[in-house]
Each structure stands twice: as structure tokens, then as C-alpha cells.
Amino acid sequence: MPTPSMEDYIEIIYNLIDTKGYARVSDIAESLDVHPSSVTKMVQKLDKDHYLDYEKYRGFVLTEKGNKIGERLVFRHDLLEQFLEIIGVKDENIYNDVEGIEHHLSWDSIDRIGDLVQYFQQDQSRVQKLRDLHQD
């Protein structure tokens, strides 16, 4: 499994390719607020570990393995955002909270959170009842 840092890069690359059709070192550096040289080093490591195919000066694409991990990481991120929104976390806190916890939860915990999100999404009155608890 990739390290948390590798996961951040794979997730960013996956999202960039999904939205723009490509991912450049400069885009990744900007997204993660790191130096391009750091991105290049990580891209080389991800290439070595078969998460992406990298050709110097030509760019890179995610491998099947990288795509599968990227898809799962985006799912995890989106699920945690939904969960925090359901339980009433303020919108301005959600992104940073997800970034802070996403690498520290097992996939078993993620699956259980998914079950809980699904439970609440099946009946919006459940969400309202939960939020009413915060009003008291």
C-alpha cells in the first residue's frame, strides 16, 4: 500500500487527469503547495512502484494499479466529506478535517462510515433528527 504522502499525490493526479485530461508537475506542485522538484522525486517513486508510467519530459499517466487506488482515494475523501456534512460539521472546516483524518482510518472504518452515510441518506429526516440534537 502507498504511504499517506504517496496517497496525496495519487489522489491529486487522479483528480487532475479526471478534470483536465492530464496532470503536470506544476499543477501537482501548486495543488499540494510543494516545490516542483519534490513532485518530480515523488513521481519517479510512484513510477518505480508501478502506480504511474513516467517518461522524462513527456509526462505521465496512471497505471491500472494507480487508477484503481486513485478512484478509491477519491471515494474515501468524498465519503468523509459527506459524513462530516451529515453530522453537522461547518462547511469551512470539512476539507481540512478530511485532510487531517483520511490517512488515519482503516478501510474497515471507511466501510462502516459508508454504511452510516447510506443509512442517513436513505431518509433525510434521520439527518434532521441528528442535527436537532446539536440545537439543544
Image: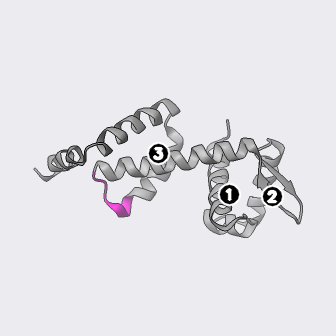
Label 3 Cα crowd, 10 Å radius (few <14 / some 14-19 / many 20+): few
Residue located 71% across and 66% down the image = 35
Q: Amino acid at mark 2?
A: Phe
Residue 12 placement: quadrant = bottom right
Label placed on residue 101: 3
Residue located 31% across and 54% down the image = 89
x and y percentages locating residue 2 in the rendered image? 68, 40
Mark 3–mark 1 CB contact (< 8 Å): no
In the image, 126 versus 134, the foreground residue is 126
Which quadrant does the N terminus fall into? Answer: top right
Depth check, mark 3 against mark 2: the one in front is 2
Mark 2–mark 1 CB contact (< 8 Å): yes
Residue 17 lies within the magenta run: no
What residue is shown with label 2?
A: 60
Question: The magenta stretch spans which residues?
Answer: 88-93
Looking at the rendered structure, the secondary structure element under dot 2 is strand
Distance Cα–Cα, label 2 vs label 1:
10 Å
Distance Cα–Cα, label 3 vs label 2:
29 Å
What residue is shown with label 1?
A: 13
